[in-house]
Image: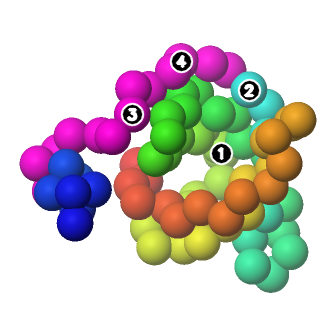
Amino acid sequence: MQAQRLFEAGRRKGDRHELDLPAVACRSDGTKIPVRVLNISYDGCQLDTKAWLEVGETITLDLARLGETAVEVRWAS
């Protein structure tokens, strides 16, 4: 419940850490997409990619030395 209230208030749980890390995103159909992680925090990250990601889409993000994690696209422009 606390996390939901922070989200609704427009606040994040963790500080964002700027970086420029190459990574690979994988769609549910197996399509691999090159991305760059521009910032990261406990509860999210910002990606840069030439591919279009749909809000609500779940992708697997493969981060070097950190492994894979499933993430949900929350915002796209």
Residue type for callout 3: Gly
Q: Mark 1: give few (<14), some (14-19) or many (20+) Cα within 10 Å.
A: few
Q: Which residue is mark 3?
A: 14
Please name which of the two marks, 1 or 4, marks the residue nearer to the observer.
Answer: 4
Q: Which mark is residue 36?
A: none
- Can I make out residue 14 in this image? yes
Label 2 to label 1: alpha-carbon separation:
15 Å
Q: Secondary structure at mark 2?
A: strand
Q: Residue at x 39, y 55 (%)?
A: 75
Callout 4 touching callout 2 (CB < 8 Å): no
Q: Mark 2: give few (<14), some (14-19) or many (20+) Cα within 10 Å.
A: few
| Magenta residue span | 8-20
Residue type for callout 4: Glu
Label 2 to label 3: alpha-carbon separation:
19 Å
Q: Which residue is mark 2?
A: 21
Which one is nearer the viewer's eye here, 42 or 48?
A: 42
Quarter of the rendering containing residue 68: bottom right
